[in-house]
Amino acid sequence: MDIRQLRYFIAVVEEKHFSKAANLLHISQPSLSTAIMKLEKDIGIQLLERNTRGFKLTESGEIFYTRSLELINKYEHMLKELDDLRQKGNGIISIGLIESAKYWLPKIIINFKNSFPDIHFQFKEILGEKKVFQTLANYDVHCTITNQPIQFEEIEIVPIYTEDLVLVIHKADELNKKSSISLEDLSERDFIICKEGFQTREDVLRAFQHENVTPDIKFEIERLETACSLIEHGLGITILPESYIKYNSNPNIVTHTLPSQFLKRTVYFAYWKDRNLSPAVFELLASIKDFFIAGNSLKSQ
């Protein structure tokens, strides 16, 4: 039994058809059928119950399929780790980012590169919990800066800072005339919010819920810059992370702090626990923690 046979078997199961699997694998159907029969002979277990309409997995086949997926994933992870080792001469760190991290991360990297001058950084914007998990699980990045409070035992998440979520409106908006603005004041305004699966959406809606207010959602977006563009053209209002607004300063939009204890979010440094990460990755984490512990609050930057 070898890796190639496992890939063949997985393809047959997932495509549910020998000819489709053969096309996917770029081999002939007879060759694929022969390979699967040889696999069954090698392990001494029938994996597929064949009939005139096709096949179905035997009970042993279902177990073998699950374990085959696990083995293939571990094998591919091993190859990526070996590639990391080959790349260590270049000192590569691949980081997943939320948009607002662009504001403060360069400040840390400036000092970090004094100690690690040969480090080569790769930045990938990764939004939404599903994407964060997938990129870490697939070893596409070494670590991720995220506001997703990930609840997977395979992933270590380290809180690095907490910030306010602030109201963002056009400079000509009538709300600017008010001495204070509440969530109730926003209930009949066209509201811009992140689409489902984004933690900022959940944080904002939770705050509205605690005030028994329902926002009139007119726009759902993925990128915060889209929300700012809509506001700049007078197409609505939104609530965004304070750090992003400071980074994305725009003379046509203004911010207001709202009186809600729920309009806050925590940002985390996340990595896959079982991955063999280089010391430089953990030095970067230490530098990030030191940066915020030293009093570099987002309000003062």
Image (cartoon, grey):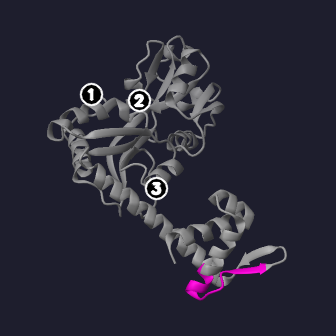
Nearer to us of marks 3 and 2 is: 3
Q: Earlier in the sequence, mark 3 or mark 2?
A: 3
x and y percent of residue 250 in the render? 44, 16
Judge from the rendering whether residue 61 lies leftward or rightward of residue 138; answer left or right.
right
Q: What's the residue type where badge 3 is placed?
A: Asn
Determine which residue is flagged by label 3.
138
Q: Is residue 43 magenta?
A: yes
Q: Which residues are magenta?
A: 39-50
Q: What's the residue type where badge 2 is placed?
A: Tyr
The one of 191 and 120 positioned closer to us in this rendering: 120
Q: Nearer the viewer, mark 1 or mark 2?
A: 2
Q: Considering depth in this image, is 257 or 17 the residue closer to the camera? A: 17
Q: Amino acid at mark 1?
A: Ser
Q: Around disc 3, counting alpha carbons within 10 Å, would you say few (fewer than 14), some (14 to 19), or many (20 or more)?
A: some
Residue at image mark 2: 244
Residue sitting nearer the eye, 285 or 1: 1
Give the Cα distance between marks 1 and 2: 14 Å
Q: Which residue is mark 1?
A: 300
Q: Residue furthest left?
A: 115
* Residue 115 in which image quadrant: top left
Residue 104 horizontal/vertical position (percent): 31, 32
How far is the residue under mark 3 from the one under mark 2?
28 Å
Give x and y (percent) for residue 293: 21, 42
Q: Quadrant of residue 49?
A: bottom right
